[in-house]
Image (cartoon, rainbow, N blue to C red):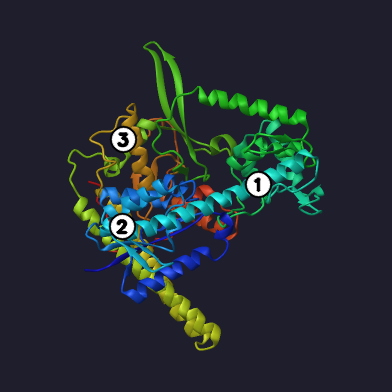
Amino acid sequence: MEKIIYPYVRFSSEQQSGGSSYKRQMGDILKYAKENGYTVNNSLELKDLGLSAYKAKHIEKGSLGDFLDALDTGVIEDDGSAYLCIEQIDRLSRQSIDNAYQVFRRILKANVNVITLMDKKIYTKSSLNDLMSIMYSSMLMAQANEESAKKAERILKSFDHKIDKLNNGESIQYVGIFPGWIDNKGTKQKTSFVINEKAKIVQRAFKMYIEGISMGDVARIFNEERIEQVAKRRHKNFTNSWSSAKINHLLKNRCVLGELRIAKTGDVYENYYPPIISVDDWDVVQSMTATKKTKKASGRKSINIFTGKMFCAGCGQKYYFETDDKITKKGRTLYYMLKCQGRRVLGCKSKSIKYDDFISSTPNMFGMVTQTKKDNSKEINQIKEKVSEISTETKKIEKDIITLETMNESGDLDYMTYLKESSKQRKKINVNDARIADFKANIARLSSDNKLEFFDKTDPVSVVKAKRFVNENFAAFVVSSDSKACTALYSNGMVIHFTLNNSKLEKKEKIKPVDGFGEFYELKEEILNAYKSGRMDGKFIEILKATNYWGVETPEKIYDLD
């Protein structure tokens, strides 16, 4: 029987993510698997980076919780061939002995074994009846819990020590990363905060908003002018693209008043930083945002299943959903509309689309609505096995690339040969990534979880399921500038072009027909160029990722919408 290892890596602090903790744990697991004849299945990507096992965050919102769910749903093999491999027992849990043992017991009772590399010990279902094994694991769990408790106590003491110094009026550096418009010319124990050039960006954002420019438009203008981000780089996914959310964060950040707020205690220390915004301007902005928030909260819950996915091919802006009230002779009538944001800020000529028109134009609701639900669990499990096989193959190819790089650096392989061979290997990885994307699309197509017998926009269950179906399957819907056609881009790069039955276009209107797919391709090129120049808006990431699979043909692509 084939022995399958599921690697699980966890560490509790973000500082460890910048070091070797992940590489060490994963490297040791892979080495152990190779030496002992295990097959590695990393398709679930079980890693909780920066999640505490002492507070059980890795179970509440991390990969370990997903793994436990996978046990319950039958995704993990239950014939004794599956092994969860961890560095040491405390990677599994640092909770109290009772809570930690329940997690441990739940895994073993599901007939999934646990390997701890620290002591090369293998726990099986039969270990639950082995008193010595139980005592040994319990002892390690107790030790891990005690270590975490001591660590938490040290952190709290350090926190209390800093608070005492602040209360005594000492100018210490409380946080590791302070606002982007502030520099510390002193030390951590005796600060000397000064304002840098980025303060002008913040002051300009406040001024523009007070003048009536929306957060989205402020972000657009900053992107067009390639204004540098205010925030300091703090994670690998940092982008230099502005968004309305980032502008909102600036406008709500009380650090601009010079305040330091302690989230744990709620304490506020005034004049901690040099202020860059007056109290009057702050109050005006907060009043404006509060008014808009109240209006939004009092509105209706959105029934738009395409939220964040619709774009205008003419101007590149997103479509937003709007509900119009009209009083007619028949009484009050609601109109659900899809409108391009570019009409308000860029003078885009695209026409509004009735939401019902767009829904009715989709080819069979992209296969979401079906009268015959089948049990495709067997086929889905077979696909998942293929995904696992391809993932294993990709890992091997990545190791081959590392070998080529090492040989090139040592001079054992000439540069041109290295380029040629590594290019071949990277193309294989690209094909594998495309195949996995296609497999995932097929799983979504076969799964009955989000399928509906009919779609009713007034039914909350229909709306929730339809939203999930759209999010799992599609990267974007790009509407042509003449508002007569739409190009649907699947997450795996597959494209479907369909005509829109737009009743908002009156027959007397003379609108010049456009090549909708051609416009879509031009928009894709603009996004690619923006990405290369480092100014791509984050809203286009899904489009870029999906179109990267263009030209990669795989046998898994399915174009049937039945």
Kind of residue indicated by mark 2: Leu
Nearer-N-terminus badge (2/1): 2
Kind of residue indicated by mark 3: Ser
Residue under pointer 1? 157
Q: Percent x, y for residue 192?
A: 82, 49
Nearer-N-terminus badge (3/1): 1
Q: Nearer the viewer, residue 57 or 139?
A: 139
Q: Which mark is residue 131?
A: 2
Residue pictured at 57% horizontal, 48% vertical: 152
Query: Rounded to the nearest whole Å, what is the CA distance between mark 2 and mark 1?
Result: 39 Å
Q: Crowdedness of circle 3 by 10 Å Cα count: few (<14), some, many (20+)? A: few
Q: Is residue 274 left or right of residue 224?
A: right
Q: Is residue 75 visible?
A: no
Residues tagged 2 and 1 counted as in contact (Cβ below 8 A): no
Q: Nearer the viewer, residue 72 or 419?
A: 72
Residue pictured at 76% horizontal, 28% vertical: 280
Q: Is residue 261 visible?
A: yes
Mark 3: secondary structure: helix
Mark 1: secondary structure: helix
Mark 2: secondary structure: helix
